[in-house]
Image (cartoon, rainbow, N blue to C red):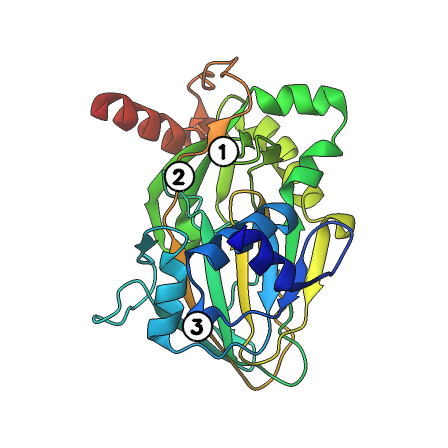
Amino acid sequence: MAMALRAADMEVRRLSGSLGAEVRGIRLASADASDAAAIRSLLLEHLVLFFPDQHLSPDEHIAFGRHFGELESHPNLSLDAERPQFFELRATGGSGAIADEWHSDLTCEAEPSVFAILQMKKCPAVGGDTLWANMYKAYDELSQPMKDLCEGLSALHDASSHGTPERKAIHPVVRVHPETGRKSLFVNHHFTRRIVETSHEESEVLLGFLTRWVTGTRFTVRYHWTEGTIAVWDNRCTQHHVLNDFEGERVIQRVTVMGDRPQPAAPPRYAPFGGKFSAASWRDEPLRRFLRDRETRS
């Protein structure tokens, strides 16, 4: 009953037909387990939530994040030694730490993050908005033949975009959300390199289509920031992209809730692509090497 009353006290305003809601009437600095349960329920419904005018200190930010699970360090960023779960990203005049490609966070890891909790500490007067896309809806609006094909496939993700291509993982192209049971597409432009079960040429066509498809405007919400706003999103069923169209300084602070292993919507139906050895085989070698290494480790 306490949770229902707390949830009812929040003012929730939907931001688009696909995903996103702005929430007022709660102070995240003093949130407790009941508040977190109500927020989690709203998050499963709206996928990304925005809480304006919060202005959390680093310790308050970490404490709020811990209500949702264990926090993890970010492998690509320089971290505060006293707070390894907390990091800050700065960009000035459109240059610096800007996530300006569509992605789900760190899908190059075997267990990508579950939730991200970001605070806008400083934002430019104009520009620097962020878009999120609903991967449930992107899957739901595929034709049935395309759904059938994608559910039997997996994809190789790596961190070559961060200068560490050796960090790789294979995930299903269509995953099932462990809490809602809904299916969503799980490929993105920033980390996903190829479809495992197809040739390089086939993968280029299919993956190119999917990574464009998931960013269709009807799947998205665009948010204009104000300083002190906290955003919380479900990394398992969304992608996001920062618009690099701003002047001045943009500073964010963030914690990340540790991940889970994506579960496929259907059992694998095909073997990894073999193909013939030829002059073009070099395109398949990173995949072959990763599969060999994974087999050896197992």
Most foreground residue, 178 or 249: 178
Badge 1 local density, few (<14 within 10 Å), some, or many (20+)? few
Relative placement, left or right, of 62 versus 44 is left
Distance Cα–Cα, label 3 vs label 1 = 28 Å
Which residue is label 2 attached to? 260
Give whichever of 198, 121 is nearer the camera.
Answer: 121
| 3 and 1 marks in contact (CB < 8 Å) | no
Which residue is tagged 1? 178
Amino acid type assigned to the residue bearing label 2 in the image: Asp
Residue at 32 percent across and 55 percent down: it is: 72
The one of 159 and 64 positioned closer to us in this rendering: 64
- State which mark lies toward you, 3 or 1: 3
Could you classify mark 3 by the number of other residues whose Cα lies within 10 Å: few (under 14), some (14-19), or many (20 or more)?
some
Task: Please report the residue visible at 68 percent of the width from the left and 45 percent of the height from the top.
Answer: 212
- Label 2 residue SS: loop
Asked whether the residues under the numbered discs 1 and 2 touch, taking CB atoms below 8 Å apart as contact, a structural biologist would say: yes
Distance CA(mark 1)–CA(mark 2): 9 Å
Q: What is the crowding at mark 2: few (fewer than 14 residues within 10 Å), some, or many (at least 20)?
A: some
Looking at the picture, how far across and down is residue 68, in whole percent? 41, 52
Question: Mark 3 — residue?
Answer: 29
